[in-house]
Amino acid sequence: MRRLLRGDDILEDWFPVHDDGSLPEYIPNQWTGPHVGKRLIESYRTLAKLPMANGPRFLSGFWPEWTREWTDEMARLEADAAQLEAEARAANRVHILPSAAEISRMEAAISWPGHYLAKTRPILAVTVQLVALWRSREKDLRWIGGKLRLGVHTVRARNRNGLDAIAAGLHRDGVPVL
């Protein structure tokens, strides 16, 4: 006997929001507003991974910032274990650089608002860029709306209109979907 599944069962097993990373990424046949937004957010995340993303770092000299004496090391041994563990985690931090493909996609995508929106609709260009920047830092639309001093619905509408306009321009120019 065949078992019929309810729609709720199917959606519960497969829902893109609950993706754990094991599913392949869905790439549409042509540019859509949400896909453009996803690529813009990805481009700002890639930009944040670049070494110069936080500004240039100049060396103040050739000597280390401080020297450690034997007495300092002995005092450090007596410190509590939690502090030592926190220092070890901070010293062991790994900075993963983006790949060449990610940088190429970032360079292409980060210019889209300026190319497709800046001359005709500058407010949409600014909104799209700021929403993508803050979404790349895991901020929600309510927080972004407060930062822009706009309502959530206004921010969402401007962002969607801008993303749809960029998608239409990319489609018109024959840019392949990334």
Image (spheres, rainbow, N blue to C red):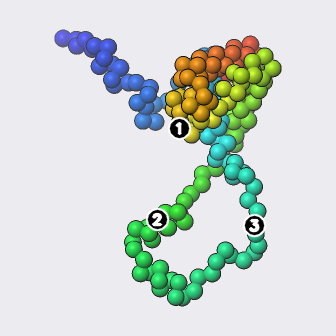
Q: Residue furthest right?
A: 119
Q: Is residue 97 above or below residue 88?
A: above
Where residue 14 sits, quadrant-wise, is top left
Looking at the image, do the residues carrying marks 3 and 2 touch, with CB atoms under 8 Å apart? no
The three-letter amino acid code for the residue at tag 2 is: Ala
Disc 2 crowd, CA 10 A, few/some/many (<14, 14-19, 20+): few
Q: Earlier in the sequence, mark 3 or mark 2?
A: 3
Q: Which mark is residue 78?
A: none
Q: Position of residue 158 (x, y in %)?
A: 63, 19
Q: What residue lies at 73% left-to-right and 35% top-to-bottom?
A: 107
Circle 3 sits in a helix, a strand or a loop, which is it? loop
Of residues 172 and 90, the one nearer the viewer is 90
Badge 2 is on which residue? 86
Of residues 170 and 73, the one nearer the viewer is 73
Disc 1 crowd, CA 10 A, few/some/many (<14, 14-19, 20+): few
Measured Cα–Cα span from mark 3 to mark 2: 25 Å
Badge 1 is on which residue? 138
Residue 35 appears in the rendering: no
Q: Which mark is residue 59?
A: 3
* Quarter the N terminus occupies: top left
Q: Earlier in the sequence, mark 3 or mark 1?
A: 3
* Quarter the C terminus occupies: top right
Q: What residue lies at 73% left-to-right and 59% top-to-bottom?
A: 57
